[in-house]
Amino acid sequence: MGAYTTPAIIDDQMRDWLVTHVARPVVAGMKAEGSEYRGVLYCGLMMTARGPMVLEFNCRFGIRKTQPILMRLESDLIEAMEASIDGRTSDGDFKWSADSSVCIVMASGGYPGTYEAGKKINGLQEAAKSNDVNVFHAGTSRRDGNFYTAGGRVLA
C-alpha cells in the first residue's frame, strides 16, 4: 500500500478542469442544499481512457493519501487549516515543492486479517538520519526504548 505525488501527474489544464468540473460543483451543491462546506475535501479520482472518474470524496486526511501530499506543502499547514475554517482559501493560496513524494505503508504480518503484534521494529534510527525521509507511526507501541508492532498498518 502507498501513494505518490508529483507535480507532473497532471498538467495545469487538467487540474483547472478538475477544479471547475468536479470540486467546485460539489462544494456549490452542498451550499445550495444548505450545508456550506468548509475544510479539506479530498477528491479521489481515477484517470481513464474516457476521462477522469470520481471514486470518492473524503473530508478527512487519509493516511497514505495525505502524507506524501503534505510532504510537498511549503505553506504553513496551520495557517492553511485556519483559512479553511474561516472560508478564506482559494486554489492558488498554497505553495508546493516541485519535488515528488512517496508514501509506503509497512504492515504487520497477517494484515489485513489477523495481524501480528509485539514484533520489534528495527531501522528507525537509520531512517531518521536521512533528510528526505519521514517516518509516520500508526500501529506502534513503545517500551524500553524500542518500538513494536501494535496494529495492522504499522508505519508509513
Image (spheres, rainbow, N blue to C red):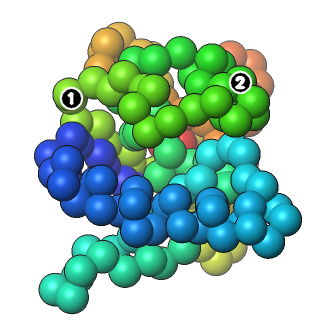
Q: Position of residue 115 (x, y in %)?
A: 65, 66
Residues 7 and 137: in front is 7
Crowdedness near tag 2: few (<14), some (14–19) or many (≥20) residues, C-alpha within 10 Å: few
The residue located at (28%, 24%) in the rendering is 97
Q: Quadrant of residue 57?
A: bottom right
Q: Is label 1 in a helix, a strand or a loop?
A: loop
The residue located at (63%, 46%) in the rendering is 40
Q: Quadrant of residue 30?
A: bottom right
Marker count (numbered): 2
The residue located at (28%, 54%) in the rendering is 15
Can you identify the residue that label 2 sits on?
82
Q: Position of residue 131 (x, y in %)?
A: 31, 13
Q: Position of residue 141 (x, y in %)?
A: 73, 35
46, above or below 155, in the image:
below
Quadrant of the image containing the N terminus: bottom left
Residue 59 appears anywhere in the view: yes
The mark nearer the N terminus, 1 or 2, is 2
Three-letter amino acid code at the position of disc 2: Glu
Q: Outermost residue, front direction?
A: 32
Three-letter amino acid code at the position of disc 1: Asp
Q: Is label 2 in a helix, a strand or a loop?
A: helix
Can you identify the residue that label 1 sits on?
99
